[in-house]
Image: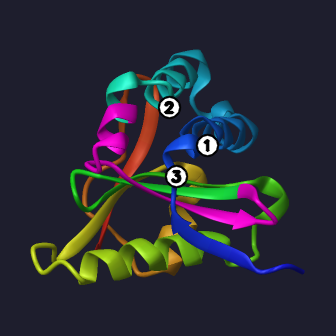
Amino acid sequence: MEEIVIRPAKAEEWDEAMELAFRVFLKFEAKDYGREGTEAFAAFVTDSVLKKAFESGHYKVYVAVLNEKLIGIIGLRSGNHISLLFVDGEYHYKGIGRRLLDTVVEYLKSDTSFSKITVNAAPYAEKFYYKYGFVKCGEVARKDGILYIPMEKVL
């Protein structure tokens, strides 16, 4: 297998990265959210304000790339909050999600203003986050049809 590279997303990769996130969401998570949640997620990944935040450097996005193909994405908003972590289904259970997560953890450790990383984990991803040291820090919640578990990890 070719080498998978984890690196910051390029501006011209934004649409492809958001399409990957939405495609993986539809395949693995949408059934847990229904129409309202799916529409809310679609609005999030097509939000022009989010794209502008990315372009200005206020929304960090890292990608996993194999042979010039995007196969994973992780987004970091508000400095230390994971807002997107998706890996193409063909590449699940190959350590790509972990590598993306490790990349943002290392990035945050280099900035002493952060002592933890947070995520509103989808039920589908809850076990993944527990496996990598996250703990539940609030009750299961639903907003705009999106069900999530607030979690955090001390850096």
- Rendered image quadrant of residue 105: bottom left
Q: Quadrant of the N terminus?
A: bottom right
Tell me the residue that label 2 is attached to. 45
Tell me which segment is drawn in magenta: 51-70
Tell me the residue at 47%/21% (across/down).
Answer: 43
Circle 1: residue type: Ala
In magenta stretch: residue 57 = yes
Q: Nearer the viewer, residue 106 or 140?
A: 106
Residue depth check, mark 2 versus mark 3: number of the one nearer the observer: 3
Q: Position of residue 95 (x, y in %)?
A: 68, 78
Q: Amino acid at mark 2?
A: Val
Q: Are marks 1 and 2 in contact (CB under 8 Å)?
A: yes
Q: Which residue is mark 3?
A: 10
- Could you tell me the amino acid type at mark 3? Lys
* Residue 31 vertical placement versus 35 (above, below): below
Q: Secondary structure at mark 1?
A: helix
Q: State the image coordinates of residue 147 (x, y, percent, origin top left).
A: 45, 38
Q: Give the spatial CA distance, label 2 vs label 3.
A: 16 Å
> Residue visible at 67% across and 43% down?
20
User: Residue 1 versus residue 140: which sits nearer the camera?
Assistant: 1
In contact (CB < 8 Å): disc 2 and disc 3:
no
Q: Is residue 85 left or right of residue 94?
A: left
Whether residue 66 appears in magenta in the rendering, the answer is: yes
Quick one: quadrant of the C terminus? bottom left
Tell me the number on the disc at residue 36: none
Q: Which residue matches tag 1?
A: 21
